[in-house]
Image: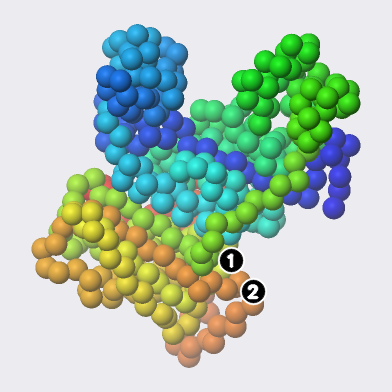
C-alpha cells in the first residue's frame, strides 16, 4: 500500500456513478421529442420539481424548487407527472450493470452508487477505460447517460463525477487530488452545506485550498472538535470510508423493457437471447461461472413472476444461459399473455480460475466460448455494437 503525500490511498480505485437528470432522462426515453425542450418531472401548480432536464436547468430550474417558482423562470417548459414504477425499473437495470462490473456496489440513492473497482481491473484495462465501458453499457441497455468520477476514495470520486457532469468521465489519480480540490469553491466540497459554507466565508475561507491551510484549532473552536477536524481532513482529500455493498446474493443479470407490451413468442425469445448475450459477456469479463439461471417476467398488469433452474455444471456461455431461460419461459407464460419486461440473472457464482470443468468427449478443442471471448474483446475495444449475433442483426428492439 502506498500513501500519497496528500493522504490519499493509492491502492484503491473507487468510482462514483451518477445518472444525469435521472427522472427526466427516463421520461425522455418515452418522449424523445422533448429532448431539446425545457421540461421537468414533478407536480404541477403547487408541486415540487423532482428532476429537470438540462435545457430547463439553463433557465435556472433545479430539483427541489417549487413548480410555481420554476414556472416563473421558464414559463414555456413542459411539466410531466412522475412515474416511480418506471424509475425503479430503470434503476434496477442500471444496478444490475454495476454488479456485473464489481461485487462491491454501494447504493447512494435510486440513481447513484459507489463502486470499488480495485479488484475489477484486468491487465491492459485502465480505470478510465472501465468507466467508459460502464457508461457505454448503461447508454446501450437503458438509453440514458451517466457521469463517472474515479478517485482513490469515495470523496474524490464523488467530486470528480460532479465535475464530469453531464455525460462525462473524470479520473483523479492520488497525486492529482490536491491540485483538483484546492482551487474549487469551498461549497463544492462534499459534506459542506450552505450554512457551513456561509460560516467559512465569514472566516475569510472561500476555496477548499484555503480551508486545508486554515488552523485546525480555529476550525474546532468554530465548528466543534469533530466537525472541525473532519473539515480539515476532507479539504486534503482524505476519506477512509469504505464502499459497503448492499446485502444479497452476488449475481450477474440484465433486464429489458419492451417499447410496448407484447405476446409475440418470437419477439420475447429474441429479446431473451439479447439479454442472455449481455449476461454471459459480463460474466466472462468478471471471470466468473454460474450455476443457477433465473428468468423474471413482468406482465402488462405489472405483476411479476420468476422461476429458477440449476444447471448441471457452472457456465458463462450464452447458449446454455439462453437455453435455460427458454425452458423457464415455457413453464411460465400462459398463451397470449402480454409481457412488459424480461430479465435473466445468473447466481451461484464461482471464480472461473477455481472451477474445474470436466471436458466432454464430443467437445471441440476450440468452440463457442472462444468465439464469444473474441467478440467480448472486440466490444471492449470498439463499443457495444461492434459484434452482434446473427439472430439479432437486422432487428429493431421492439
Q: Could you tell me which residue is drawn at 39 percent across and 29 percent down?
A: 50
Q: In the visual, does 94 lie left or right of 164?
A: left
Q: In the visual, does 179 lie left or right of 123?
A: right
Measured as percent of width and height from the top left, residue 74 is found at: 35, 11
Residue 255, quarter of the rendered image: bottom left
Question: Closer to the camera, 360 or 16?
Answer: 16
Circle 1 Cα neighbour tier, 10 Å, few/some/many (<14 / 14–19 / ≥20): some
| Sequence order check, earlier mark of 1 and 2 | 1
Measured as percent of width and height from the top left, residue 89 is found at: 35, 49
Alpha carbon distance from label 1 to label 2: 8 Å
Residue, disc 1: 287
Q: Could you tell me which residue is drawn at 23 percent across and 54 percent down?
A: 302
Q: In the visual, does 169 lie left or right of 307?
A: right
Q: In the visual, does 347 lie left or right of 322?
A: right
Q: How many marks?
A: 2
Q: Compared with residue 310, is residue 218 higher up or lower down, i.e. above or below?
A: above
Residue, disc 2: 353
Marker disc for residue 92: none
Question: Closer to the camera, 25 or 265?
Answer: 25
- Do the residues under discs 1 and 2 have CB atoms within 8 angstroms? yes
Circle 2 Cα neighbour tier, 10 Å, few/some/many (<14 / 14–19 / ≥20): few
Measured as percent of width and height from the top left, residue 299 is found at: 21, 58
Q: Could you tell me which residue is drawn at 83 percent across and 28 percent down?
A: 220
Q: Compared with residue 379, is residue 71 higher up or lower down, i.e. above or below?
A: above
* SS at mark 1 in the image: loop
Amino acid at each position: 500500500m502506498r500513501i500519497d503525500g496528500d493522504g490519499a490511498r493509492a491502492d484503491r480505485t473507487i468510482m462514483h456513478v451518477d445518472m444525469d437528470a435521472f427522472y427526466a432522462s427516463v421520461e425522455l426515453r418515452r418522449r424523445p421529442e422533448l429532448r431539446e425542450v425545457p421540461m421537468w418531472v414533478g407536480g404541477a401548480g403547487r408541486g415540487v420539481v423532482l428532476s429537470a432536464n438540462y435545457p430547463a436547468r439553463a433557465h435556472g430550474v433545479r430539483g427541489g424548487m417549487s413548480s410555481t417558482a420554476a414556472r416563473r423562470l421558464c414559463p414555456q417548459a413542459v411539466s410531466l407527472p412522475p412515474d416511480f414504477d418506471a424509475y425503479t425499473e430503470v434503476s434496477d437495470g442500471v444496478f444490475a450493470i454495476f454488479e456485473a462490473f464489481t461485487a462491491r456496489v454501494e447504493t447512494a440513492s435510486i440513481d447513484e452508487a459507489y463502486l470499488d473497482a480495485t479488484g475489477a481491473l484486468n491487465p491492459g484495462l485502465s480505470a478510465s477505460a472501465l468507466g467508459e465501458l460502464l457508461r457505454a453499457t448503461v447508454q446501450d441497455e437503458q438509453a440514458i447517460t451517466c457521469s463517472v468520477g474515479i478517485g482513490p476514495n469515495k470523496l474524490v470520486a464523488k467530486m470528480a463525477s460532479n465535475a464530469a457532469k453531464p455525460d462525462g468521465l473524470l479520473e483523479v489519480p492520488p497525486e492529482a487530488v490536491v491540485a483538483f480540490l484546492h482551487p474549487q469553491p469551498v461549497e463544492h466540497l462534499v459534506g459542506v452545506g450552505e450554512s457551513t459554507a456561509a460560516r467559512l466565508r465569514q472566516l475569510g475561507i472561500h476555496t477548499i485550498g484555503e480551508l486545508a491551510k486554515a488552523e485546525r484549532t480555529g476550525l474546532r473552536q468554530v465548528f466543534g472538535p469533530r466537525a472541525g477536524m473532519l473539515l480539515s481532513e476532507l479539504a486534503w482529500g482524505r476519506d477512509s470510508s469504505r464502499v459497503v455493498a448492499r446485502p444479497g446474493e452476488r449475481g450477474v443479470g440484465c433486464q429489458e423493457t419492451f417499447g410496448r407490451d407484447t405476446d409475440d413468442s418470437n419477439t420475447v425469445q429474441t429479446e431473451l437471447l439479447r439479454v442472455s448475450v449481455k449476461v454471459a459477456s459480463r460474466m466472462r469479463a468478471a471471470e466468473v461461472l454460474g450455476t443457477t439461471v433465473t428468468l423474471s417476467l413482468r406482465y402488462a398488469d405489472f405483476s411479476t413472476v420468476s422461476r429458477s433452474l440449476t444447471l448441471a455444471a457452472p457456465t458463462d456461455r450464452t447458449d446454455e444461459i439462453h437455453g435455460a431461460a427458454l425452458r423457464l419461459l415455457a413453464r411460465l407464460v400462459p398463451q397470449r399473455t402480454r409481457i412488459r419486461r424480461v430479465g435473466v440473472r445468473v447466481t451461484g457464482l464461482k471464480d472461473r480460475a477455481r472451477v474445474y470443468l470436466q471436458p466432454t468427449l464430443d467437445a471441440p478443442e476450440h468452440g463457442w466460448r472462444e468465439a464469444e471471448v473474441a467478440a467480448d474483446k472486440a466490444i471492449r475495444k470498439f463499443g457495444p455494437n461492434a459484434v452482434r449475433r446473427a439472430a439479432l442483426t437486422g432487428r429493431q428492439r421492439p
